[in-house]
Image (cartoon, rainbow, N blue to C red):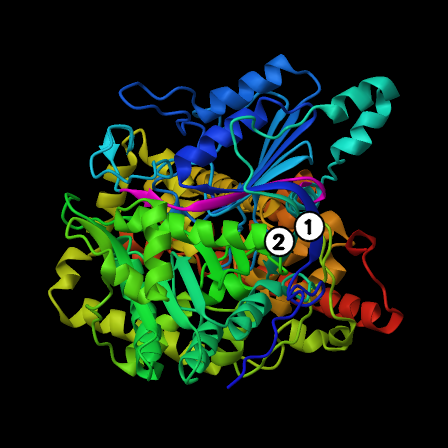
Amino acid sequence: MTLPAAPSTLLQPGRNCWRVEKAQRAAFLVDGDDYFRAFVEAARKAKRSILISGWDFHSRTRLLCRDRQDCELELGDFLNGLARRNRHLHIHILIWDYPVIFGLDREWAPFYGLGWKPHRRVHFRYDNTHPTGGSHHQKIVVIDDAVAFNGGIDLTCRRWDTNDHSPDNEHRHVKGTAYPPFHDLMMAVEGDVAGSLGDIVRERWRKATGEVLQPPAAQRRVFRRRAAAEEMKTSRWPQSLNAHLSEVEVGISRTAPAVNGDPGIREIESLYLDMIAAARNSIYIENQYFTADKVGDALAARLAEPDGPEIIVVLRELSHGWLEELTMQTLRTRLVQKLRDADKYNRFRACYPFIAGLKEGTCIDVHSKMIVIDDDMVRIGSANLANRSMGMDTECDLTIEARGRKDIQQQICGLRSLLLAEHLGFDVQQVSEAVANTGNLRDAIDQLHRDDRTLKPLNELPQVSETLLNVISVADPEKPVGLADLAQIFSPRSPEASMADAHPGAFVTNRSEANEPSEALGTSGPAWGKIAAMAAVVIALTALWKFTPLHVYLEGNRIMGWARDVGQTWWVPILTVLAFTPASYVMFPRPLITLFAVIAYGPIWGFVIAMTGIQVAAWSSYVAGKRLDPGTVRRMAGAKLDKILQVLRRRGLLAMTALRLVPLAPFAVEGVVAGAIRMRLWEFMLGTAIGILPGTLTSTVFGDQLSTWLDDPRRINYWAIAFVLILLGGATWLVRRWLLSAASTSSRHGVSDPRTV
């Protein structure tokens, strides 16, 4: 069978890449030591701008480590020093606003006032614009839009290592705790491609913060032309970094999730599929993960071809912790087994780098995200071979094609030989000769086997049931799964609310839903199931109290005495006030806390404590809402609250009062939404106070009368209870009628909130 001629270019802007830009120089950086040195040298040449985009950042990251010497420089001090020495330089750092589960090894946020304090021209921000489960995963550094680095290495701890990956390197530790060898790659580029990478970071900054950053070229306009021209002549390329390529075109491919009205970007996935289809002789892959379903299908199809390419996949042996082992490693096992089943012609190898002397339970941490196709294409970036990197996270990869140029082919082949030499413990020349002599990568790897350092086959693959695989596949989704999707599963009604790409704090409501005020207010009928369940619980508790020994311990005077004794401790009132905040978030019945306060401190002080505690809880939810992006808040609140808030946002204090009096969503969710839409704090707090007043007063009266009943049932005041119930019921009915009327008016007249534009 005659193979078709290779295309002149595989890169197609708008399909599998964003742009194809010229690079005056490009270099491959293998492992953290090479990258950190190049970064330091380039950053010292910065005149106007340093942009840093990453999954993580740590100011205590140690740079310029040398053998038998202490590591020179710490990242935070280094960046602050650059800003102090150059008053024109601004440094912008954007990292993922990660969940707490990822924060154990991370640094406290600088704006908490703990740890590192950035210089006033070092701007540190978090990106929280991703869908639930998604992350900001790009690792880009741009110097003056002239030189840029892109790949898999964040400027953070546990990334530094040298090419020899010694089992006991004295500099490979964090806070005195050693970490295993770490392997990864970056690509350095100079020229127009660096400016395009700067555009990517500035756009992510705009989406995350709402701030527009000007490129360095625009900043120079305020200076004299001669000074700007001299500045442009100064190269930012690290002098000690030898360029592997010159005057080449570089394709920039991205992944971005479909969220907040954006359709999403899947250029990275498309390019993977195109590269695999274009391979003739070999596909060499290094990656942290190996779970992407569509990529796996494409590789399996090539293995089924009689004259398809050989496929070498270098992965890490072990996972990080039990959770990753259960999820990503199990999904990797499924994909590896699938490819082995498809490998009818023995052309597939899945292996991991081994080096003798490592501590038991550790391995060389392969963190790379790279692929080489034949000698014609090399790609280095941030995207893992995982479903989430194809459509869920923000990613960025750089690709260089040879397009028939012999010098580029030699450098691509040389990079692959360099990586194999590092893993196998031989020099590059020996690896190149072994590949040339054997005619393929598989036999060359076997020929260069060493007992103390080699690439071992990934053989120990635990068997997992298909049922378990289906369950854990949710750990690696390829597209966002909104809370509305989950609501559709658990709710008989599936609201079809749409989100717009609004500025921070703004929401847009689907106008077609404005004609359903009754449904928005939940007036479809009483929840008889809930009422029956509550009645059953009350009856069960009554029987438990009446017919078991508990009645001895739950006797009224005993409860009263315990509550009043506890209340004498000085810190209990403070604790009671603070208890309302977590209770609001977990939806614990707040009236029970009010009841305790009334019994322990009497009706007046109990009422004061309850009102104070609820206000503190409301304030905390408001502050939380101001930090969340609109999409996250929208998914938290759901369509029911969003419908009625189109009316409520136009009425400030009255709106908040009504919302608290007739709650349409959990207490904390209402506060989060109020903070997110930037309602005035005084309106929010005063409206909350007025709105919760009847309910808190009711709880106080009931608590006081319960206390009276426990002391002496004959003293209970039924008139007081009836009055409070009538007052609360009447106020609720009036507010509900007002809300329905306002919703109907809004629907008829198409009224919109100017703050949502």
Q: In terms of secondary structure, where does tag 1 sit?
A: loop
The answer to whether residue 642 of the structure is visible from this angle is yes
Residue that extends furthest to the left in the rendered view of this protein: 549
Q: Amino acid at mark 1?
A: Ile
Q: Residues within 10 Å of mark 2 (few under 14, many from 20)?
A: many
Foreground residue among 32 and 724: 32
Asked whether disc 2 touches disc 1, contact meaning CB atoms under 8 Å apart, the reply is: yes
Query: Which residue occupies 51% across, 58% down?
Result: 134
Snapshot quadrant of residue 647: bottom right
Q: Amino acid at mark 2?
A: Val
The answer to whether residue 708 of the structure is visible from this angle is no
117 over 348 or under it: above or below: above
Residue 207 in the magenta stretch? The answer is: no
Q: Whole-percent x and y of residue 388?
A: 48, 64
Q: Whole-percent x and y of residue 611?
A: 51, 42
What is the tally of numbered marks visible in this picture? Answer: 2
Query: Which residue occupies 24% across, 62% down?
Result: 446
Q: In terms of secondary structure, where does tag 2 sit?
A: helix
Task: Give the labeled residue for mark 2.
Answer: 673
Task: Give the labeled residue for mark 1.
Answer: 677
Q: What segment is highlighted magenta in the picture?
A: 181-194
Residue 187 in the magenta stretch? The answer is: yes
Q: Residues within 10 Å of mark 1 (few under 14, many from 20)?
A: many
Foreground residue among 354 and 555: 354
